[in-house]
Image: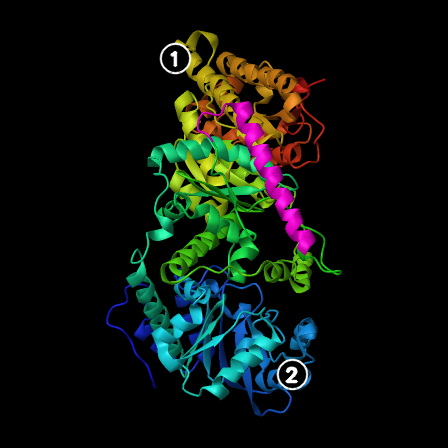
Amino acid sequence: MSNLTIAENYQYVNNYWDEAHAASLAGDEVALLLYRSNMLGSDLRITNYGGGNTSVKTYEKDPITGEQVPVMWIKGSGGDIGTLTRKGLAGLYHNRLLALKDRYRGLEFEDEMVGLFGYCLFDLESAAPSIDTPLHAFVPHIHVDHLHPDALIAIAASKDGEAIAREIWGDKVEWVPWQRPGFDLGLKIGDCFTRNPDVEVIILGGHGLFTWGATAEESYFNSLNAIEKASAYLNAHYGKDRPIFGGAKIESEAPEVRKNKAAELAPYLRGYCSQFRSMVGHFSDDERVLEFINSNDLTKLARLGTSCPDHFLRTKIRPLVLDDMRADLGKEELREYLSAKFEAYRADYASYYDRSRHSNSPGMRDPNPVVILYPGVGMFTFAKDKQTARVAAEFYTNAINVMKGAEAVSEYVALPEQEAFDIEYWLLEEAKLMRMPKPKSLSGKVAYVTGGTGGIGRAIAEELMQQGAVAVLADRNLLEETQAEVGKAYGKDNVRSVGVDVTQADAVAESLKQAVLAYGGVDIIINCAGISISKPLEETTIQDWDRLQDILVKGQFLVSQQAVEIQRKQGTGGDIVNIASKNALFAGPNNVGYGTAKAAQLHMSRLLAAELGKDKIRVNTVNPDAVLRNSKIWEGEWAEGRAKAYGVSVEELPALYAKRTILNEEILPEDIASAVRVLVDGSLKKSTGNVLNVDGGFAPSFVR
C-alpha cells in the first residue's frame, strides 16, 4: 500500500473506515468502491447529498471476446455516494472512454459527448453515466474521489485560492480554474498528471476536490487527509484578521421564540412559494445558519450567491432575505410586506434570466425563492417535497460554510452569473427534468390526521402518502412506533407523529405548530380522532356524554378552528374531511350519546362548508359503518355494547354488519381511506358540504 497516511485523530472529518469490514470485501474492488463511497457520503462536511462522485477501474471479462478488458465503475447520474449501491453505478469500457478524445470537437460540442457515453457501456444494466464520467476517465489511478468538502470549496471560491492552495500543499497540488463539468474539463484534469507526475491533490476552482489511490483505503484516507489539512488551515484563520462575517449585527431570539416566530411566518411564506405548485417546507435554526443571518455581512454575501454548482442547482443562485421586517407588523401589514418582497425577488430572478438566456435556453422556471433567511430566527427552504427542501437547507448551510472559510482567508468569489445560469438552464439538466415522472395528485400537500395511529387514521394517512402527500399523525399513543413503521414504508422525511389531546386547545395548537415547523403548513385536515360508547339511555352517564361531546364534537371544532387559521395564512385553499358515522343519519338502538355526537359532527361540517367557501376551503364528511378490523373503537366495551344491542356475540358482529349491507361487504379501514382520497385529490375539487357514505349500502342512512 503506497503513500498511505492515516492520522491518529481526525478533528474536522470522521474516520469511519473499518479494517475488518474492508478485509471481508478484499478481492471485490467494486464492493470496496461502494464501501468507500458510503463512508465518504455519510459525513456532510465531506460532500453534500447527491454531490461528488467516486469511481474504480477494474479488469473484467468481455462477454463477446472473453478477454480481460479495463472497465471503469462510477456513480451514475443523479445518485448519492452516501447511499450508493451497485444499481447506482455505471460500468463503462475504459478504453472506449479514452478513445472519445478523438471524437471531441471542442467546448461548443460538449453536450454531444454525453450521448456517446452510452456507446461505452460495459454493463448494460448500468445507471445513466453522469457528466462527471470523463473527469474520472483521464485520472491515471485505480480509485478516484471527486468531492465537494466545504473546506476545499472555501479555498476554491477564494479570490486568492490558488495561492492559498500552494501555501498548503506546495508543488503537490494542481489548480484547474473554474469551468463547467464536461469532456474538456476531464482532459484538463488528465493534463495535470502529465504536467506534474507527483501531484497529490487537484482543486477545481469554485467547484471541488480530486484525490485518488491505488486502493480504496488509500483513496479514502487521501481524501480525509486533504480535507483535514484544508480545514485546519481555515480554522487557524477564523477571527484572526476580522470578525467572522464582519461580526454580529443582531442577536438571535431565544430558541422557543425562534420556533414560535417560524411557525407563525412559515404558512405565509409557503403560500407565496406555492404560486405555481404546492411546496413543502423545512426550517433550520442551526447555529451555523444563525451566525450568518445575524451578521453584518449577510446582505453583501447573500446577494453574491453560491459558488459550487451543486449548491445553486438546489438553492437557486441567491436567497430571499427578510432583513428589514419589523416585529410589530399586523396580519395585513405582514401580507403587504411579504407580497412586496416576493414580487421584488421574482422580478430580480426574471431579470437574471433575461440577461443570461441563450436563444435555445429552456423557458424560465419558477421564479420564487427556495431559500428564505429571517435574521434572528432561522432559514426556511421550500421545494416539491420534504427531502428536496431538507437537502436544499443542507446545501445552503454548506454554502454558508464556504463563505465563512473564504472570507476568513481571502475574499469570497461567487460563480459568475452567466456561468451560474448556464448550469441552472443547461439543456442536459432540462432533459433530465423532462424525464422526471409527473407529480402525483397530492405531491407537495401536507395532511394532518387526528387519530393518526389508529386503524382508520393510519390507513387514511398512508393512502394520502401513496398519492404524494406528507403526513402528520396526531394521536395520544403509539407515536414513535407508528412513525417508524410508516417512515420505513414511505420515507422518514414524509411522516411526523405528534402528541395531541383534541379536547385541549393548547395541545391542538402545539401539535399544529409542530406540523408547520416540520412541513411549512397544512393543506388537508382529517378529523378522525374518536371514541365509541354504546349504552341505552338509562345507562349513559354524564361522564359518557361529556367524553363523547368533548372528543368528537369539541375536538373537531378545535382542530378545524386552528387549522383554518393556518390555511388562511397560506391563501391556497385546502380541505377538511371529518370522519363521522352512519349513526349521524341512522337512529339505532342503545346509542344516544354516540349518535348525537356524530350528528353534531356532521352538521358542523355543513356549517363550516358554508362559512369557508370564500377561502376555497372545502369541508366534507365521510360516514363509515362498522369498520371492525384494526379499529380502536371496536376494542372492549363498544363491541360488547353493539353485540348486546343486536342480540349476537362479539364474534358474530362482522358477519352481521356485512349481511345487513346492500352489497353484503365488510368495511375496511382502506375503504374509508379511499373515500377521503377522492375528496382531497382534486377529483371533486368543486364539491363541498357533501357526505360520502362508506357502509356497503345501508338504506336507512341514505342521505337522500
The span shown in magenta is 326-355
Q: x, y percentage for residue 411?
A: 43, 60
Magenta: main secondary structure: helix
Q: How crowded is mark 2: few (under 14 residues within 10 Å), some or many (20 or more)?
A: some
Whether residue 155 is visible to the viewer of this picture, yes or no, is yes
Q: x, y percentage for residue 191?
A: 53, 84
Q: Which residue: 69% across, 52% down?
A: 354
In this rendered view, identify the residue nearer to me: 683 or 542.
Answer: 683
Q: x, y percentage for residue 614?
A: 66, 21
The earlier-in-sequence mark between 2 and 1 is 2
Left or right: residue 276 versus residue 203 is right
348 in the magenta segment: yes
Left or right: residue 109 versus residue 569 is right
Residue that mark 1 sits on = 543
Q: x, y percentage for residue 654?
A: 55, 31
53 in the magenta segment: no
Residue 581 sits in which quadrant? top right
Residue 313 sits in which quadrant? bottom right
246 w.r.t. 514: above or below: below
Q: Which residue: 47% across, 66% down?
A: 81
Residue 231 sits in which quadrant? bottom left
Mark nearer the viewer, 2 or 1? 2
